[in-house]
Image (tube, rainbow, N blue to C red):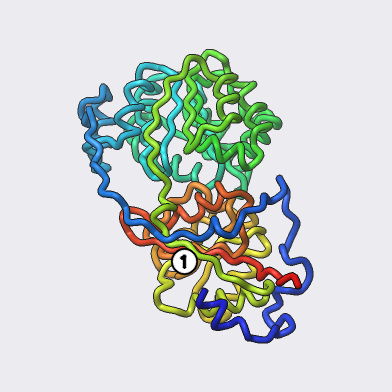
């Protein structure tokens, strides 16, 4: 623990950074109590990645029974061979079957459900006919962007219904009777309650990252939304894991689903993981600031627990000359999109984020993940550190823990 040893003798500065004044969390937290995680689980010597055997698809994109315009859009995007989830799920979705897709993030599952749905919806007059629910604004926005690319020239259009943006524009979009509704549970339920969203013609329902939506407490909203969707529909669940709660949801809202599982081992085994001991929050900030001044911390994702705490930490780093941006639920959609683009493009080296805001984001080349605050669960920890060490690159994860007083 180099940082703990090097800085361990530094005296407490009485709150010079302002991080130990008031409540340590920087705001109240809703949701379940944080589960204790033994610090030993945050330590792991990275194992070299085994040579992965490339997946050999049974189909080419050209083999799928899509129309000429959709094939043109797929080709324009540069797609030739489908990924494993695309290769295995698309034929079932084309056949109209309910599907449970179990796949890691970044495996191409968005195209796996969008392409066959777009093909099946062409020419349908009753609308909206497709409802896609995602846990976060960013993921919903990414799905909407892919939909717009694949649906060019097909006369289909969508409405993006998420929080953090002006509801008036979304109401106008809904009044145009779009074919696809893509949104987050809270705003969808709000629009439904205000009678701007009518789901009586929906024939296809997609729940993307269903496990995460349940983790985030969206189950009551999802049940309320699904109760308004016709029972005679196609239902697609995509999830990284199948928990008992997911199984119960699937059993309630789908019929004879086909399971397509292409999940691979967790990337956490291949990420160098260690803990950093700190006496208190002020000491944590000092250690973090020192670390981020070193060149090896090239593109760093820092996780904090609360919206207020994340913003305050990002501001502090920026004031110390470390280019930083924050992403959390108090920022509106355009602010979050702008922050994400700055980090992806390398205009800032550090992004400080809450779990909710960072869920579903595909950020390449993250050199380090730092858990400034420990996560709610070990599953959240695995998800956080999975943002580094992708695509065969080396990855590093650090987790701050409190120095335990020695009992005499």
Q: Is residue 92 above or below residue 38?
A: above
User: Helix or strand or loop: what does disc 1 sit on?
Assistant: strand
Q: Position of residue 231 (x, y in %)?
A: 57, 15
Q: Depth check: 246 or 94 in front? A: 246
Answer left or right for 199 relative to 66. right
Q: Position of residue 205 (x, y in %)?
A: 51, 25
Q: Is residue 384 above or below residue 126?
A: below
Q: Depth check: 135 or 25 in front? A: 25
**Extreme residue toward the right, this view:** 22
Answer left or right for 404 relative to 359. right
Residue 152, can we see it? yes
Q: Position of residue 394 (x, y in %)?
A: 35, 61
Residue at left offset 21%, top offset 26%: 63
In the picture, residue 220 is in which quadrant? top right
Residue at left offset 51%, top offset 54%: 384
Quadrant for the C terminus, please.
bottom right
Residue at left offset 38%, top offset 40%: 264
Crowd around label 1: few <14 · some 14–19 · many ≥20 (10 Å): many
Q: Is residue 202 above or below residue 70?
A: above
Q: Position of residue 106 (x, y in %)?
A: 39, 45
Residue at left offset 51%, top offset 32%: 242
**Extreme residue toward the front, this view:** 408
Label 1 sits on residue? 300
In the picture, residue 248 is in which quadrant? top right
Number of marks: 1
Residue 147, can we see it? no
Q: Is residue 2 above or below residue 229?
A: below
């Amino acid at each position: 623990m180099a940082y703990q040893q090097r800085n361990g003798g530094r005296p407490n500065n009485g709150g010079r950074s302002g991080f130990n004044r008031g409540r340590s969390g920087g705001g109240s937290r809703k949701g379940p109590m944080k589960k204790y995680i033994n610090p030993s689980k945050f330590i792991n010597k990275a194992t070299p990645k085994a040579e992965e055997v490339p997946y050999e698809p049974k189909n080419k994109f050209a083999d799928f029974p899509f129309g000429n315009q959709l094939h043109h859009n797929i080709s324009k995007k540069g797609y030739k061979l489908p990924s494993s989830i695309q290769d295995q799920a698309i034929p079932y979705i084309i056949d109209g079957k309910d599907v449970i897709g179990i796949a890691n993030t970044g495996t191409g599952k968005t195209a796996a459900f969008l392409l066959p749905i777009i093909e099946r919806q062409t020419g349908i007059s009753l609308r909206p006919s497709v409802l896609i629910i995602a846990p976060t604004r960013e993921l919903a926005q990414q799905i909407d962007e892919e939909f717009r690319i694949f649906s060019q020239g097909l006369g289909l259009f969508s409405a993006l219904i998420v929080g953090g943006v002006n509801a008036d524009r979304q109401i106008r979009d809904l009044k145009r009777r779009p074919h696809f509704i893509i949104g987050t549970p809270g705003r969808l339920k709000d629009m439904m309650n205000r009678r701007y969203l009518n789901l009586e013609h929906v024939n296809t329902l997609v729940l993307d990252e269903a496990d995460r939506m349940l983790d985030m407490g969206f189950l009551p909203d999802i049940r309320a939304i699904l109760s308004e969707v016709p029972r005679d529909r196609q239902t697609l669940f995509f999830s990284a894991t199948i928990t008992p709660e997911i199984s119960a949801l699937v059993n309630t809202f789908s019929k004879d689903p086909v399971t397509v599982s292409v999940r691979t081992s967790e990337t956490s085994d291949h990420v160098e993981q260690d803990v950093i001991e700190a006496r208190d929050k002020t000491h944590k900030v000092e250690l973090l600031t020192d670390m981020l001044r070193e060149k090896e911390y090239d593109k760093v994702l820092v996780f904090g627990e609360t919206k207020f705490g994340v913003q305050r930490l990002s501001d502090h780093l920026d004031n110390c000359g470390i280019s930083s941006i924050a992403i959390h639920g108090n920022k509106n959609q355009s602010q979050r999109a702008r922050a994400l683009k700055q980090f992806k493009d390398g205009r800032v080296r550090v992004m400080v984020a809450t779990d909710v805001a960072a869920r579903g984001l595909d950020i390449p080349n993250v050199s380090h993940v730092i858990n400034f605050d420990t996560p709610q669960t070990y599953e959240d920890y695995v998800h956080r550190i999975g943002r580094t060490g992708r695509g065969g690159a080396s990855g590093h994860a650090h987790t701050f823990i409190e120095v335990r007083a020695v009992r005499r």
